[in-house]
Amino acid sequence: MCLAVPVKITKIDGKEADVDIGGISQHISLWLTPEAKVGDYVLLHTGYAISVLDQAEAAETLKLFEDIAKADK
Amino acid sequence: MKFISEFRDSELAQGLISDIRGKSKQKVRLMEFCGGHTVAIFKYGIRQALPANIELVSGPGCPVCVTATSDIDKAIALAMVPGVIITSFGDMLRVPGSRASLQQARAAGADVRIVYSTLDALTIAQENPAKTVVFIGVGFETTAPTIAASVLQAKEQRIKNYSVLSLHKLCPPVIKTILDAGEVKLNGLICPGHVSAVTGSNAWEFVARDYGIPCVVAGFEPTDILQCVDMLVTQVENRRAKVEIAYKRGVTPEGNLQAQKIMRQVFEPCPANWRGMGKVPDSGLKLRQKFADFDAEVAFDIKPEPAVEPKGCICGEILRGVKTPADCRLFRKVCSPENPVGPCMVSSEGSCSAYYLYGEH
């Protein structure tokens, strides 16, 4: 029920935004993430963005996984 | 970066599995609090991938499952009031109450509509000014701010025929209840990712500090969960207990301050009834006096008959992590997703549904 999916913001209009979900456009609310900008990925939960995803942290996590996988070989 | 496929990479997952296998010596029992994690763990075969000394038990993290029968009865009683349109997330419709489900109430003529978002419920209210639209507010800290936002929007847009039956639950108080009961011994907690996106990982500090149990917040992709298990095992092996985040792209220690603010603005904590755990202090949310006009409990004086629990159903014990669906005499024989007896079989995130669908007997 706490399902949330990463979606990319394509347009912002006040407290609302259009997002791209695998090629489909959806209108969502930014009431909970006023700091979100066009181009950001947000976690979408029941029509509301609940968190702006941090690209740098994501890249760092993936780098860590790659290092672990390399160490394993 | 698409934030999905990268975290499903099998080579990276394999690396994490090898790392866990190399590190993990002691027998450990980890609880995944969140129903979303339960489903992901089954779906990606994570139980089978982990060494035998790591046991995963499911917790009470499914809002539909923990909603008390008496509260479902209340929602059904509201649905039967003439002029009321009930709006609800889809999962709630098939949950059996004492005498019927919302779906059966709909079949009997009640106007019950599934919505994806409270935004849809507000639209229904605007389109039906002669009716009263009640939203069945079920969910944890992830969902409660979205419902609080809908109340603020209704107030701002002067939508007067919209109200909320607030059955929200808060996660940290119920974890405390489970730990205090001591029925299930845990060596680590896989903390819910999207609840923590709102509350921040700081919400779990008391678990590490007061109970000495390592806590790691996890995302929902396979490498997220494996990283979480890896970090928990590392803490256990090094005899440490602290709160860490294995989902740094979406969760911070402080959480979403705006969401917390909106939630506090509209709701205040209250005692709540949990299936399997009874009344837990300060674990629910009710609308503040200032928003009484939007409170379905105030607008309607609903007093359903005393609740009757389904006979033989052990959902309560399953939600506490004390028993598994395999321990239930009804599982697969009488109770199935087509004919659910208890809520853990109804909800797509319930343990019984996950055990049933992914074949663990």
Image (cartoon, grey):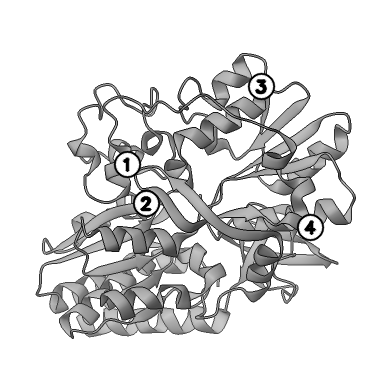
Of the two numbered discs 3 and 2 on the same chain, state the one appearing first in sequence: 2
At x 70%, y 70%, the residue is: A33
Of the two numbered discs 3 and 1 on the same chain, state the one appearing first in sequence: 3
Q: Position of residue A19 (x, y in %)?
A: 71, 60
- Disc 4 and disc 1 on one polypeptide chain: yes
Q: State the residue position of label 4.
A: B152
Q: Amino acid at mark 2?
A: Pro
Mark 4–mark 2 Cα distance, whole angstroms, equals 29 Å
Of the two numbered discs 4 and 3 on the same chain, state the one appearing first in sequence: 3
Q: Amino acid at mark 3?
A: Met
Q: Position of residue A2 (x, y in %)?
A: 51, 54
Q: Chain of mark 4?
A: B
| Residue ranking furthest to the top | B108
Residue B80 — which label? 3
Q: Chain of mark 3?
A: B
Query: Is residue B297 depicted above or below B23 in this figure?
Result: above
Decide: few, some or many residues near mark 1? Use Cα within 10 Å; few <14, some 14-19, many ≥20. Answer: many
Residue B316 — which label? 1
Q: State the residue position of label 2.
A: B60
Decide: few, some or many residues near mark 2? Use Cα within 10 Å; few <14, some 14-19, many ≥20. Answer: many
Tag 3–tag 2 contact (CB < 8 Å): no
At x 40%, y 78%, the residue is: B205
Q: Amino acid at mark 1?
A: Gly
Query: Dividing the image into 4 quarters, which one contains the N terminus of chain B?
Result: bottom right
Q: Is residue B256 left or right of residue A66?
A: right
Residue B245 at least partly seen: yes
Of the two numbered discs 4 and 1 on the same chain, state the one appearing first in sequence: 4
Mark 4–mark 1 Cα distance, whole angstroms, equals 35 Å
Q: Chain of mark 2?
A: B
User: Quadrant location of residue B351?
Assistant: top left
Q: Report the mark closest to the observer, 3 or 2.
A: 3
